Image (tube, grey):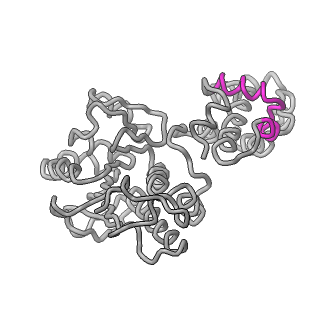
Amino acid sequence: MQDPAAIPDDPHFPPNLAVIDHPRRVEILAFPNVQLLDVTGPLQVFGSANIAVRHSGRAAAFYAPVMIAAQSVVTSSSGLGLVAQPLPPMTLPVDTLLVAGGIGVNEAAANPFLVNWLRNRAQAARRVASICTGAFLLAEAGLLDNRRAVTHWSRCAELAQRFPAISVEPDPIFIRDGTIWTSAGVTAGIDLALAQVESDLGRDVALAVARDLVVFLKRPGGQAQFSTLLALQMDGGRFDTLHSWMATNLASDLTLSRLAEQAGMSERSFSRHYVRATGRTPLRAVEELRVEAACRLLAETALPIKRIAERCGFGSEETLRRGFLRCLSTTPGDYRDHFGG
């Protein structure tokens, strides 16, 4: 299998696409009670990348994605049975080795045979990745020692406690530390796979795949697991209608009096109940929503920062800058430099 670093650029094709001797084998390891979307989400990303490659004029597929398991049929936690290929021999070339997560991961990680197989199989792969709680299998195999890693937000503390040699970061969607990638919750596995496709084939192919899968946004790994709107929705639902209205009217007047009016409450009563429900003041929530919207525009568009400030309701670049410093401890320009295409 050809080293991707040795594949020359060609102006007629995306990076690394001009020359390929054989499709790159992508394996995803499954086990009983695996999370279905941990398996199918990333596999579909690589499958859709093959379609995008063909549309660019290439006849051959770039990837050869397969699901592997110690059993011939794996029943996912949703009850759907998946037909798996057997665990391959160590000598079989593999480009990308993914490990899924799910409620069955603890039992899988307690299987010495599977852990030993994974430890050895990883040595043959160009890169290794975990989806969601699949990080526990990588950790048990020692593959995350002295590395940065992430898993589902609800189990980050457990991962850090059980494996102190790992530097667990609870916030990012996914983390790449050298040849090892780890991702957060279920849909973050799609973001990770898209990032790997972008690394192999370029941004245009990755965005074409995102559009094909109707993914709302191809998120960079350093963004938070929770969106602001999702975090606000954890208040029990009392202000869900208000939050939806806020998110679609960020450039409008979102003063305290306007929010209280929209909620049908007095300012004093609204402020008290809102802080109790969400843990933040109404104006802080507005600022966080506006900053998150600005982050999307900075990462995914070439709009001038001044225009982004106006569209997101900040009014001026300086107000946008102060909001970024308060919420993210960085500036809009630095954020675009880090996450922008």
**The image quarter in which residue 280 lies:** top right
Q: Nearer the viewer, residue 108 or 147?
A: 147
Q: Does the magenta stretch include residue 243?
A: no
The percent coordinates of residue 322 (x first, y second) are 72, 23
Q: Is residue 314 magenta?
A: yes
Q: Nearer the viewer, residue 116 or 278?
A: 116
Is 22 left or right of 330, judged from the image as shown? left
Against 332, residue 103 (above or below) is: below
Q: Which of 154 and 41 is in front in this view?
A: 41
> Image point 51% across, 56% down: which residue?
202
Q: Which of 334 and 160 is in front in this view?
A: 334
**The image quarter in which residue 20 lies:** bottom left
Please provide the residue range marked out in magenta: 306-327
The percent coordinates of residue 259 (x first, y second) are 82, 33
> Image point 80% across, 35% down: which residue?
306
> Image point 54% across, 71% down: which residue?
56
The percent coordinates of residue 48 (x first, y second) are 49, 67
Q: Residue furthest bottom?
A: 59
> Image point 74% across, 43% down: which residue?
247
Could one spot residue 140 in this view of the protein? Answer: yes
Against 3, residue 284 (above or below) is: above
Could one spot residue 187 in this view of the protein? Answer: no
